[in-house]
Image (cartoon, helix red, strand yellow):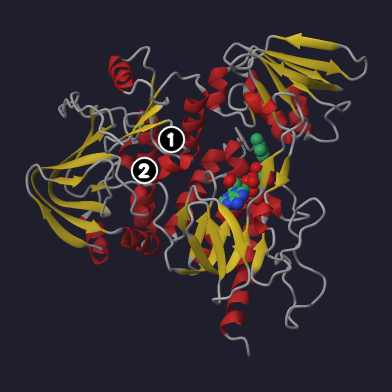
Amino acid sequence: MAKAPTTNEAHDTTTPSTAVPRYDQTFPTLTDKDIERLRRFGAVRRFADGEHLLEAGKLSPGMFVLLSGHVIVTQRDGMGHVTPLVEEGPGQFIGEVGQLTNRPAFVDATAEGNVECLVIPPDGIRTLLVAEADLGERIMRAMILRRVSLIQSGLSGPVLIGPATESDVIRLQGFLTRNGYPHHLVDPTSDADAADLIARYAGRDLPLVVCPDGSVLCNPHEVELAHRLGLVGRSAGQTLYDVAVVGGGPAGLSTAVYAASEGLSVIVLDARAFGGQAGASARIENYLGFPTGITGQALAGRAFVQAQKFGAEMMIPSEVKTLDCSRADGAFGLLLDCGNRVRARSVVVASGARYRRPTIENLSTFEGRGVWYWASPIEARLVASQEVVLVGGGNSAGQAAVFLSGHASKVRMMVRGTGLAASMSRYLIDRIANTENIELMTQTEIVALEGQPGLERVRWRDRKTGTETTGAIHNVFLFVGADPATGWLDGCGVNLDRTGFVVTGAPLDSYQGRRVPALESSVPGVFAVGDVRAGSVKRVGGAIGEGAQVVAALHGFLADAAHPSL
Ligand SMILES: Cc1cc2nc3c(=O)[nH]c(=O)nc-3n(C[C@H](O)[C@H](O)[C@H](O)COP(=O)(O)OP(=O)(O)OC[C@H]3O[C@@H](n4cnc5c(N)ncnc54)[C@H](O)[C@@H]3O)c2cc1C
């Protein structure tokens, strides 16, 4: 770890940003009556002129409601670039969604003259959001809009330094984007400060990541970066949770929202990011209530904040390696990749599915260097005006083809079968047929990938004629299905079907004479929801419904476990 140069710390607060959309909702002024209602959730503190209420990269004590005086809020990235954001006065408050869970601040907030404010700690904020419906809604909306504006401004959070097309840059950018974490990318070829920093780190792995606290990481793993940024929740330690939810996709987030809102203590663990497969969806058009569609990231981002509002604790990224169902000490034990152990009275398996990797020569060589398993705006930028190949005939393949067709010059959509009718929704088939730059190539398969170091050529075969063709293609998108992510359940006694999905709701009433709930596995107290469950519908709506449904069964199990003789 090292400190980034601080020579660039120009502090100009004279021209506050006016580029904040929906300004009044983002920076609302609370009335005296509102503030009276807030007093019971916090304590009054005073700050002298020039004192920091918040510092970027450091833990924040909560939200600050200004009672008197003014506070200047500025954005600062790890390179020392400071940008004025807003000046707040009496009745306004400082805080964004990170303060719901005691995460580090993205901004500096400095007292301008003497300041008196009400400091509301994270648990107080969560209580007020639930207890004060109207006021809570205004505060929550402002917090979400502030996070969105921090992401869009690209002026706070860590700075990634490296060429935009480099695979590790894309990996880290994708990770931060999927976690809704403000950051920005600086290309050393066009930014002198960045080039200077890279020169100082000559011989070290790129990209560099300059964190808001000034420390510099060289091509970090996602988990290392997350810990440095304070993204991962506090260590579970000795806490015994009512429910541990494994997977932060739609099923896991839904379980967390319903379980936490009904008073259960919940921890959610996800190996990568919240949102799961749905987070990779450019547009979900069949989710109830969104007639114009919604991106998977937007839907999941809302659920993520909602779960935290009800008190669910998030440990993301944290991969569960094994589940110990022996309950030797009275609880299930979940061993994490960092070596920590989480204890819970019950477990909800919501680990969904992992992208299938077809057998193509050299596939692993090009993963992250031209072979992609999702299509987000980051990959779309890479394929601008290029020809791409997309493999797959399901709905996710169809959505990705339509999305990429708006960026690439041509999308060659390859399927092994004779058409799409058996595997894709009608509306997507029609849309593909009506998109000029998508060419559907049936009975076609990729046979080889070539290039050095990145992907340069793709060879494919027409299965009808056996003819092989080689095309100058630099990006291939694979949407060939997914396998259940259940390896971590090995050896714990949970029954899987022959394809690896968790079997639930056994017809036998075998557990202490009790009816086995529909979503409970063969191990009492271990439940499964969403795509990972045998027989589930593999849709966002289905996953969310099961998350809501499992909570009644959790209550039943926890009540029986607490009073076994009743
Ligand atoms: C590109 C794409 C587009 C789609 N479009 C639509 C659509 O338009 N409409 C629709 O209804 N459905 C759509 N789907 C399907 C939908 O996304 C899934 O049905 C849904 O996401 C399933 O939710 P889930 O929570 O069960 O699992 P997932 O979304 O798969 O989430 C599982 C989570 O568990 C985590 N995990 C796995 N193993 C572990 C472990 N050991 N430890 C910790 N965490 C772990 C993963 O990181 C992941 O985040 C689409 C899918 C894709 C890929």
Circle 1: element type: loop
Type of amino acid at the residue the image marks with label 2 = Arg
Q: Residue at x 47, y 30 (%)?
A: 173
Q: Is residue 285 visible?
A: no
- Which of the pair 346/5 is nearer the observer? 5
Left or right position of 358 against 313: right
Type of amino acid at the residue the image marks with label 1 = Pro
Alpha-carbon span between mark 2 and mark 1: 10 Å
- Which of the pair 68/1 is nearer the observer? 1
Where is 337 relative to 508, above or below?
A: above
Residue underneath mark 1: 220
Residue 52 image offset from top left, x and y in percent = 16, 45
Q: Quadrant of the C terminus?
A: bottom right
Where is 328 relative to 215, above or below?
A: below
Q: Residue at x 61, y 21 (%)?
A: 370
Circle 2: element type: helix
Q: Residue at x 28, y 59 (%)?
A: 121
Residue 406 image offset from top left, x and y in percent = 61, 19
Find the residue positioned furthest to the bottom: 565
Q: Are marks 2 and 1 in contact (CB under 8 Å)?
A: yes
Q: Residues within 10 Å of mark 1 (few under 14, many from 20)?
A: some
Residue 475 image offset from top left, x and y in percent = 64, 19
- Which of the pair 293/225 is nearer the observer? 225
